[in-house]
Image: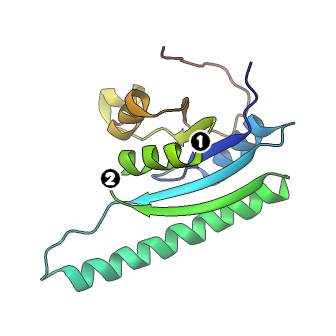
Amino acid sequence: MKQIGNILLVVDGEYGRDALIAEVATVTKGSTAQLTLLSVLDTPPGDQAMSTEASELHQWMEEDCLEQMQDISSELEKRGIQVTIKQSSGKPYLEIIREALRGGYDLLMKPAENEVGIKNMLFGSTDMQLFRLCPCPVWAFKPTSNTELRKIMIAV
């Protein structure tokens, strides 16, 4: 089996920070894997009347995401995991796939999107696009405080 040495972790949406860190630490335990944190924000609308406000809001969101990623990065580095941080803007699934192609990653990890209703049992649209198009294996997970793996679904 191929050793996982280069992991791309997409940090977007709502998730438990501590549970996310525990999940990543479990996967990288006992290896020398390098981890890249990626945050993707939608591009602000191009309407000129809203451009100033939208760009300021986008800038604030980028700074907030960067701060969150630095917080996660420092926790993971305390656990001995090498971490790199990257930010991008655009359609999330496209930017994630572009980064996966550029970086030659062995694994893409992403917290599953929280959908409402019956879709709560399944995955969100970005997750489904990644399952279809990503050039590397995708591990979509729901971060929980329990780090013991109970159920794994693999699509072939």
Quarter of the image where one finds residue 117: top left
Query: Which color mode does the image show?
Result: rainbow
Say if 140 sits above or below 21 in the image: above
| Residue 15 rendering spot, x and y as whole percentages | 53, 49
Quarter of the image where one finds residue 52: bottom left
| Residue 154 rendering spot, x and y as whole percentages | 53, 17
Q: Earlier in the sequence, mark 1 or mark 2?
A: 2
Query: Which residue lies at the image location 64% right of the left edge and 35% below the top edge?
Result: 106
How many discs appear? 2
Q: Which residue is outermost to the top?
A: 156
- The amino acid pointed to by label 2 is Lys
- Residue contact between numbered discs 1 and 2, judged by CB atoms under 8 Å: no
Horizontal side of residue 15 vs 71, given as left or right: left
Q: Which residue is mark 2?
A: 91
Query: Which residue lies at the image location 14% right of the left edge and 81% below the top edge?
Result: 48
Report how far apart the C-alphas of labels 1 and 2 lie in the structure: 20 Å
Horizontal side of residue 106 vs 52, given as left or right: right
| Residue 16 rendering spot, x and y as whole percentages | 59, 50
- Residue 127 vs residue 87, the one in the foreground: 87
Q: Residues within 10 Å of mark 2 (few under 14, many from 20)?
A: few
Q: Which residue is mark 1?
A: 104
Say if 12 sits above or below 26 in the image: below
Horizontal side of residue 156 vs 70, given as left or right: left
Say if 24 sits above or below 74 in the image: above
